[in-house]
Structure formats: C-alpha cells, structure tokens
Amino acid sequence: MKIGSLAEALVRSAAPWISIKGGVSLDKALSEIPRDAAYRGACQNLLYCVSRRRAFAEAAVAKLVSRAPDAKTAALLELSISLLKEGKEQEFTVCNQAVIAAKSDPQTMRAANFVNAILRRYLREKRRLTDELERSPVVRYNAPMWWIRRYEAVFGKSSREIFSLQRRHPPLTLRVNKRKAVLEDVLADYRAKEIVCVPEGMYGLRLEEPRPVRDIPGFADGLVSVQDAGSQLAAPILGAKDGMRVLDACAAPGGKTAHILELADVDLTALEIDPLRAVRITENLDRLGLKANVRVADASDIQSWWDGKPFDRILLDAPCTASGIVRRHPDIPWSRKPEDIAQLARTQAKLLENLWPLLVKGGRILYAVCSVFSEEGPAQIESFCSKHPDAKLIPIGPDKEILLSLPPAEGVQDKPEFFPKTHDGFFYALIEKI
Ligand SMILES: C[S@@+](CC[C@H](N)C(=O)[O-])C[C@H]1O[C@@H](n2cnc3c(N)ncnc32)[C@H](O)[C@@H]1O
C-alpha cells in the first residue's frame, strides 16, 4: 500500500507521542526523528498540534471509547482528534489518512475499523463533546490543575488571557546582528521580498508567518538570529562594555552569548554543562562571525573551570521550570511536577551563591529565568540580597524596575520603547557588587 504523507506522519508520530505522554520532552522526542527525513516537518507540526490540545484529545478519546485501546491506537486517535480540533485539514482527509495509518502498522492494523468508527463518531458529536469537555479547566487551559492554580496565583484574572495566548502559535522573532546589519535595512529588504514583519523591541523583527530558518533571508550569513523579544532584553540590560571580562554561565544554545558579543568587544567565557548543547553555542557563534571561550563545565563547580580572574559582568540565565515559554513548549505544564519548582529554585540559588565571589567590585550579575513563578524570580532574588549586604539591585530600563517580571504578552505596550510588545514570560534582576 502506498502511504499518504499525512498517514505517514501519523504513523511516525505515534511512538514519539507515547513517549511524550510518558514524560519525555517534546524537544527530545523531536531530536530522535532523523533530521533529513522527509516526514520530519509533518511530524513536528503534528506533535506540536497534539501537545497544544493534549488534555482535550485524551479526554475525547476516553469519552468516545467503551474500552481503553492499546497505546498505539490511542495515540493515533489522539493525534487525529487534535488535527480535527485544529481544523486546518479537511475532516474526511484526516479520517481517511488515520485509517490508512492504522492499516499500515502491524500493531494497529486490526484496529483500522475501530479508528474509523471513533473518528466519525467524534465528528458527529464534536459540538456537544467540546462543550462538555471544556467545562473542565484542565481541558480548557491544557494544563494539570496544580499548574493552573500556580498561574492563577501569579496572574489573577489575567491568567485566562495568558492561557488563551498560550494556545496560539508563538511568533517568530528575529534579532538583527548589529555588527552586520541595520534593523531598518533588514526590515526594508524583507518588505521588498513581501515578508510581512514589524519591528519588535530594540533589535528585533517579528515575522507574521513562521518559516524555516533556511527560508529566512540573511540567516545563513549571520545577519539575523531567531530569538524571542523578551530574551533580547538580556544583553542590553547586562550592559557589557568594550574590553570587559564577561561570563555567560549557562549559555547554550548561545542566543544571549551571541547578542552580548554583537553589542560589545568583550572577552567572553561561555559555560554549558551539557556537551551536546555546548556544540550549538559554537555553531551559532560561527554563523554570526563571533568568538568566545566556550567550555563544557558545571558553572557552580568553580574549581573545575575558573582561572581565578574576576569578571566585570556575569549573565546567569539559569535552568528553570520554563513556565514563561509554554507557548513555544506546550509540553512543559505536563512534563513538570510541583516539586520541580523548589528543586530548581535550590539549583538557581546555588549557582548565584557560587558565582557571586567571581564578580569584581562594581561588577554586575544579571539573573534571568524564563519562568513566571516567584520562587524562581522575585523570591529568589529577595532571599539572595537579604544574605548579601554587598549586593545592590540596579533599576532596569526606563521604568526603573528593580525586579522585572514580564508576563507572556502579545501586542501589549504598557512600557516605554525599550520593551517589546510581543514576547515570552521572563524575569530579570540586575545586581551590582558594592
Ligand atoms: C535557560 S538555558 C540557557 C539559554 C541561553 N542563555 C540562551 O539564551 O541561548 C539554561 C542552560 O543552562 C544549562 N545548565 C544547567 N545547569 C548548568 C550548570 N550548572 N552549569 C552550566 N550550565 C548549566 C542547561 O543545559 C541549559 O542549556
């Protein structure tokens, strides 16, 4: 049987989807699909689609079947229902391709009629079913209840809006490499090429339609990089000047490392604990024509890597729950456990504590996390400052905030020019050693 491309994507996505449901991250599952496989792009779309609708797809399958099917058949049904819910593909195409997919895999072959019957029943009952299922906040917001409560505690009434924003596709934001191009020129060039885009923050451009990097003019030549606009605030806030010695303590894949180097001629050490991720720092710097001392090391194990010379600036973009970037990583609420927050907060505290002595007097450390939870942001910094009388918080940006919490936002401009309008959730605190 010649298998259609959607059917092939359904078949190829079933096993990764089962592993994602078992706790493997979406990034890791995608990294196991061969880079050059023709079906890779379709699988990626499908796995993002189902991750954004995980609670709905699981609840719908549970409602529609009288006896739980085997894992592969359940996965095929959930993937297909998420596509039907998304509504981009024709309904009959999804049903037909799902049946072809079931028939093409020896493990699901005998369930092909069952898959057909369940999907057709879903289509007949979808309105009633959707109303019923979406009464549950878990389905409506696509997150476990503990996560929803956490968000509500942070954002109050705005949490609904933030949850609905996270269901939409994330924007594709680029950072213009100041060493090689001028933002206005790139903007004009893209518009001439009919790429719809708008300026975003100080160095960014937001593209209306996402596209692979190979189709972004100037990407291969290092004129632009992909980086969220909230993330693009780190280098300017850090404020490294020519000649300074700078440490980027948790650097991979190197987005902020590169931005620091685009803005000033500094002697930069970039540390990364994960050797595979460290390779990506060098790849990114090579593409942009930048240089740093990239090392694989545990930043908190100072003895293992430090040469004893203090730093003028340290960026600590610490490992965190990533609760501010769910729009880009829709699997995050499902892959985290409540106890992860305290565990990660301890790791962040250790990194801060151990890196503080490496800073020269008058030097500054920028603490950053892409999390919206207080334990990883404001509470972390308040606790650190209470223990360090030589730590002084420096106001950030024209609004002079000392603890800058940016909620995930789209088109919101309640801050001066300096700030982007559309960005992920971030927390920044700039601390000077006095
Ligand atoms: C939030 S990401 C950094 C993103 C990066 N700054 C960028 O903008 O592209 C955190 C990184 O820190 C690394 N990491 C975690 N613990 C570390 C440690 N103790 N020492 C060095 N790197 C660490 C993680 O592997 C991860 O790549």
Image (tube, rainbow, N blue to C red):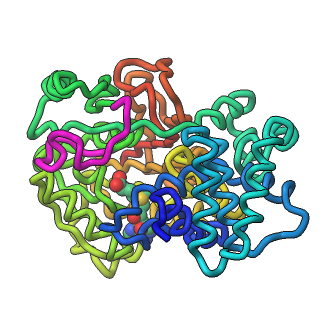
- To which quarter of the image does residue 140 belong? top right
Q: Where residue 82 appears, x then y in whole percent?
A: 65, 49
Residue toward you, 175 or 339: 175
Q: Where residue 46 appears, x then y in whole percent?
A: 53, 54
In the displayed structure image, the side of residue 312 where residue 242 appears, left or right: left
In the displayed structure image, the side of residue 35 where residue 44 appears, left or right: right
On screen, residue 256 above or below 87: below
Can you name the residue that lies furthest to the right here? 66
Q: Where residue 422 appears, x then y in whole percent?
A: 45, 29
Residue shown at 65% from the left, 34% from the top? 164
Can you name the residue that lies furthest to the front here? 1
Q: Tell me if residue 196 is in the magenta stretch.
A: no
In the displayed structure image, the side of residue 302 where residue 246 appears, left or right: left
Residue 353 seen in render: no
What predominant SS class does the magenta segment belong to?
Answer: loop
Q: Tell me if residue 208 is in the magenta stretch.
A: yes
Number of numbered tags placed on the structure image: 0
In the displayed structure image, the side of residue 348 where residue 238 appears, left or right: left
Residue shown at 70% from the left, 67% from the top? 112
Q: Where residue 56 appears, x then y in whole percent?
A: 74, 49
On screen, residue 176 above or below 420: below
Residue toward you, 187 or 231: 187
Residue 21 seen in render: yes
Which residues, given as a range, are shown in magenta?
207-226
Residue shown at 41% from the left, 43% from the top? 430
Residue shown at 22% from the left, 68% from the top? 294
Residue toward you, 103 or 170: 103
Ligand 1 location (quadrant)? bottom left
